[in-house]
Amino acid sequence: MSDHVDYRPFARALPPGRARALPWMTVIAGSAITAWPVIATVPLMPPFGLLMLLSWRLLAPFALRRWAAAPLGLADDLFSGQPLGSAVLLWSACFIAIDLIEQRLAFRDFWQDWLIGGGAVTFCLLAGRFIAVPFDSSLNGALLLQIAASVLLLPATARVVAWIDRKRGHRA
Amino acid sequence: MPTPRDRRTGFSRRRQNMVFIGYVLAVAGALIGAVLLVVSRFDPPMFAALRMAAASVTAPISSGVAGAGRAVWSIPQEISTHFLVRGENERLRAVVARDRALVLRARSIAYENRRLRTLLALRDREAGTVAAARLVSSSATSGRRFALIDAGRLQGVQPGMPVRGPMGLIGRVVETGPWVARVLLISDPNSIVPVRRTRDGLPAIAVGRGDGRVDLRSVSVANARFQPGDLFVTTGTGGIYAPNVPVARVEQPGSDTVIADTMASPDTLDVALVQRIFLPIPTSPAPSVPAKR
């Protein structure tokens, strides 16, 4: 971000290795939130790993490599209980789709980012539900609530990501 | 915010190649995901091992956080107990006096039951408890309903073992790690438990709905009526679950298929008892070679 006022222009930025690892760590930490000791009878928890990933991709496009979605998706599958490979496929598809959109949409603001991220989250949750659970099970009300909660959380995760990105320094 | 300038590669051959390889790897990642998804239909044991390795790291953290939460939560409970204990004492005395007659009758019935059973030479298999554990975390983001318990192979837990709570059936173990095991809850859409009604033995199956409740489907009688309050327990059919473990209670009247609440509420982070498989699959005897004459 070039348009924010830098109050500490001579503060030391993180070393490059750590600055590069930080986005990966935050996404994996988001995936690992399912380890929080709550036994949910209804799947309502938003997919925090995916929210962090999308926020990084939309706010700081160079923080994660283009191929980073696949290994991060694998880590998410290990924690989430979905069939192994579902997040690998869906997250990679999101990255490719965002790349295509980015080439066409020259100027975008946070509202467009929110729309793109919300669309990606909705796609991942819907596709993940049809991959994991039989077609006729009655999960749709809970799924709609989960999608709504996730889309509403996107500005919050964008805030967190922007804060971490500013701490991280401009070099990485 | 315009598109970042760094997307443009310019004339640098190296930069162009790097961008191209990045896209190739991104598409390759998606393809690998599709292949993994197809392979996971067959559920190879290596995937289970990977998942259990990840769970072995997270489960001790989860149980530590849960323990701290319980400790904090116990402080207000202790205080309220201190002030409410007098009234509770009086109420409990009244309950004991009221139930004395009932207990005496139940004792005589139990004695008679034991006598009649020995008369019939029926032998009950004891459902032995393998390990007592706690549910520590669950698949809260996914549509599947799995939970992790903090006991695994080292405690003798094996895949297939039934898990029950103090109130009723919770599910069964599907994957085990060294000190952690994954439990398929009975509310998972892929879980089916054979049950019968306590009142008249009406057979049914309990199929998970994914939202914490189960569908009860009648299997023998057409147009079977379900009343609110009907209690369903396991039958022992299939050999996994021991008979007479409470499973679900009907909430709304209906026929053939009704929604029911599970008796065990796993969201209370309560104790889970892992039990032995009720009737293990018998190992086939070695084929006997007929003697030549």
Image (tube, rainbow, N blue to C red):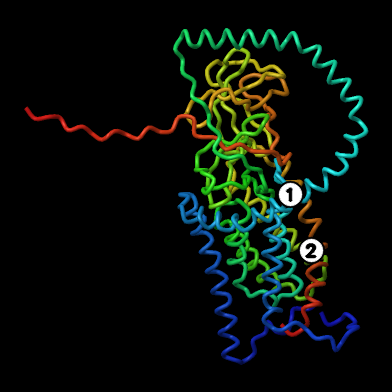
- x, y (%) of residue B106? 66, 11
* Dot 1 amino acid type: Ala
Count every numbered label the image shows and give the total: 2
Name which residue lies at 17% across and 33% down: B289
Q: Is residue B36 above or below residue B122?
A: below
Dot 1 falls on a residue whose secondary structure is helix
Name which residue lies at 63% across and 62% down: A91
Q: Residues within 10 Å of mark 1 (few under 14, many from 20)?
A: many
Chain bearing tag 2 is A
In the picture, residue B216 is in which quadrant? top right
Chain bearing tag 1 is B
Separation of disc 1 and disc 2 at Cα?
Answer: 25 Å
In the picture, residue B215 is in which quadrant? top right
Front one among B279 and A131: B279
The label shown at residue B66 is 1
Name the side, left or right, on which A59 lies relative to A128. right
Front one among A31 and A111: A31
- x, y (%) of residue B116? 52, 8
Name which residue lies at 55% across and 55% down: B51
Name the side, left or right, on which B66 lies relative to B118. right
Front one among B72 and B15: B72
Q: Is residue B113 above or below residue A75?
A: above
Dot 2 falls on a residue whose secondary structure is helix
* Dot 2 amino acid type: Thr
Can residue A26 be seen?
yes
- Location of the N terminus of chain B by quadrant is bottom right
Name the side, left or right, on which B148 lies relative to B160. right
Can residue B144 be seen?
no
Quickly name the residue at label 2.
A157
- x, y (%) of residue B288? 20, 32
